[in-house]
Amino acid sequence: MAVEEDSAQVSEAQIAVHWREEEYIQPPAHFIGQANAADPAILERFKEEHFPECFKEYADLLSWDSYWHTTLDTSNPPFWKWFVGGKLNACYNCVDRHLPTRRNKAAIIWVPEPEDQETRAITYQELYRQVNEMAALLRDFAGVKTGDRVTLHLPMTPELPVTMLALARLGVIHSEVFGGFSGAACGERIADSSSRILITMDGYYRNGELGDHKVKADQALDRARQEGQEVDKVLVWRRHPGQYASKSPMVEGRDFFIDELLPRYRGAVVEPVSMPAEAPLFLMYTSGTTGRPKGAQHSTGGYLAYVTGTSKYYQDIHPEDTYWCLADIGWITGHSYIVYGPLALGATSVMYEGVPTYPDPGRAWRIAERLGVNIFHTAPTTIRMLRKVGPDEPRKYNYHFKHMTTVGEPIEPEVWRWYHEVVGKGEAVIVDTWWQTENGGFLGSTLPALQAMKPGSCGPGVLGVYPVIYDENREVVAAGSGRAGNMCIRNPWPGIFQTIWGQPDRFVQIYYQKYCRNRESTDWRDWPYFSGDGAVQAADGYFRILGRVDDVINVAGHRLGTKELESATITVPEVAEAAAVPVVDELRGRAVEIYVSLKPGIAASKEVEEKVSMAIETEIGKIARPKNVWIVQDMPKTRSGKIMRRVIAGISNFTDVGDTTTLANPEIVDEIRHHVQSQKMSSGEAPRELSAEEAEEIKAFGQVE
Ligand code: WTA
C-alpha cells in the first residue's frame, strides 16, 4: 500500500454482503445412475488426510513410460513438483494409446461456421496420422527441438489441436495466443517466450466473413523485433488448402504454406519424446496487475493428470459421450477441456469455428441436435447472449444434454435458471466451475452426481483441493459469516502452474507472498495460494465468487489487466493519463470504460476518443474495445498522485464513490460525475441498480497494489 488513505479502504472488500440464499437443486436420477463419480467413497479418498497421495488416482488415468517415485516434492516452495521421477508424453496419452481400442472413433468433430461447409470428423487414427506428419515437419523442416517454445496464433480449426499435439509429441512447449488477439499482443508473447517460430492461419470465418488473419503475423513479427526477438519462420495453415485468403504477402524464405510442405512427410512416424513429468507442456499468457503479460507455465505430468481426472469426474466424460465445449482453445478452458482432458479420456470432442448465434439464434442448438451432443460446456456471457437473442430457441431442437458446465465468470441465479430449465430442458445436471488460467483445471465445483447444485455458487472445493477465505489480516473468514474475503487455496494440486515464464520472483510475489506464513518453511501448509478473487462461503461450505479483487476486468470471461488497457491508451500521442475501470454490463458481465486526460493545449474531440478505442484494438484486440472513452480535465488522485480508480468506477456505475475527502483534488469528482452521468442518461446507458455484490466489487476496485 502506497499511502495511508488507501489502506483504510481495503477493509471494504471484507464488508458483509447480503444475497438471497438459493435453494438446492438435486441431480436427476438418470444422471446419477451413469456417473463416473457416483459412490460417495470418492469424497473420503480425497480428504485432507490422504493428501497428496490421493492424486495417484488421477495420475493412474495416464500411461507412463516410467512411474514416479515422489508424488509431491515441496523442497523448493512454492515451486511444487508433482509425480517426480515419472516420464510420459502428452501426445501419446491423447492419441496413440487409444488406437488399439478406438482407432475408428471420432476424436474431434469440427463444425465450420458456414453451414454449407461440411462437418469434419477426425478419427483417432486420422488424428494420429496428422499429428505425426506435422511433428515430422516441425522437427525436420522448422528444426524445433525439445524444450523450445513455439508461438501459435491459430483460430478454432482442427489444425490448432493437431499443431499443439505435434509439438507436445516432440516435447516442445507450445504457446497458443487467442486468435482474436491483435498482432501486437501476439508479438509481445512471441518476444516474452523467445519463440523463433510462429504458426498461424491465413484466415477463418467469423460472422459469415472469411477474415484476414495472416496480416496479424506481420504485425506480430514487427512487434517481436522491437522487443528484440527475431522469428525465423512463419508457418501458415490455409483455411482452404491451395487458396490463400490473405492479402498479406508471403515473405520468401520466411513464410511457408503448411499444406504445401506436408506431402513431403506423408506417412512419417515420429517417436513421442518421453518427457519428465515436470517438463513444461505449454505456456498460456494471461493478464495481471502490471502491463507485461504473464506466461503461466504448465507441467506435463501434473497438468495432464489433473485435467484428465477432472474431465472424468466433473465433466463426467465417458468415451461414448459427445462432448462440446464452446470455448476457444486460445484460452485455458479450451486447452484443458477441449483438447487435453477429453482426448486423454478417448472421448469425442466437438469444436466449432465461429459465432454461436451465426447465422441465427438456433445455430448452437442445431449443432447439438445434429451431432447428438450430450455434454455442453460454455460461459455465462454466451448463455446471456443466447438467452437474449433466442430465449425460446432451445425448445425447437431435439437434443438432450445430461450435463452442462458454466465457467469463466460469476453467473446470475436468474441466468443459471434459464440455462437449467430451457437449455438443459430440466434434464441436465449443471456444474459451475471456478478456476483460473494459472490453475490448470477446476478448483471449485460440485461433484455432479453427489453434491446438489446451488444457482450462483460454484460449490465446495473440488476433490483434493481445500479452499479458504482469508481477510486482509490473514484471519480465516468463517463459512456462514456472510463476510467476503480473499479466495485462497491452502494446498498445492497437480494442475497448478509451475511459474510465470521467466519471472519466478513475480510468481512468488503475486500468488504466495500475501499469505505465506514462513518463507523458510518447506511445509505446503505455510504457503496458501492467493487467487485474486473475492468470495463468500455459505454455512454449507459452498463458495460464491464475487469477482476480482485486483486490477483485472473480466469482460465476457476474458481477463484484461487495467495496466494493459492503460498502456495501450497512452500510445495515443494526445493522451497524458489514462485509467481503465469496469462497468456492469448486461451481456458481457463487465465492460471497460477508459478515462483519459489530455496533454496541455489539446482539446477534447470524438477523434481522440476513437483513437483511444483503435489503440486498444491494435494493442490487445477487439474484445477489449471500451464501451466509452471519457475525456476529463483531471483524474481524481490521492495526495501521493495515485489515480483513484474506485472513484471513477463509482461514477461510471452510478454507485457511491465513497469517501473523497482525502483526495488531493476532491472538487474534480463532481465535475466528472456531471460530465459522464449526464451523457450516459441522455444516451439511455444508465445501468439498472446494482446488486449488493456488484456494488461491493466496484467499490473495492483498484485498491489492491
Ligand atoms: C473468474 C478461466 C465466477 C474469476 C477458467 C477468475 C469465475 C477468472 C468462474 C479467471 C466461475 C472463472 N464463477 N467467476 N465459475 N470461473 N471465474 O484465467 O474471477 O480466464 O479469477 O480462467 O475468471 O479467468 P481465466
Image (cartoon, rainbow, N blue to C red):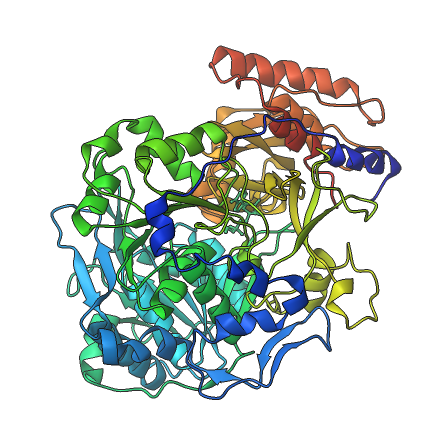
* Residue 315 position (above or below residue 541): below
The answer to which quarter of the image holds residue 76 is bottom right
Residue placed most toward the observer, 387 or 468: 468
x%, y% of residue 195?
48, 72
Residue occupying image coordinates x 58% and y 61%? 44
Number of numbered markers: 0
Please report the residue visible at 61 percent of the width from the left and 26 percent of the height from the top.
Answer: 19
Residue 14 versus residue 491: which sits nearer the camera? 491
In the image: residue 224, left or right of residue 366: right
Residue 189 left/right relative to 140? right
Quarter of the image where one finds residue 169:
bottom left
As drawn, 341 above or below 450: below
Residue in the picture at 78% in, 18% down: 667
Where's residue 533, x and y in %? 64, 45
Q: 547 or 638: which is nearer to us?
A: 547
Task: Tell me the residue at 49%/74% (across/down).
Answer: 59
Residue 405 horizontal/vertical position (percent): 41, 46
Q: Could one spot residue 613 in this view of the protein?
A: yes
Look at the picture and state if 171 lies above or below 464: below
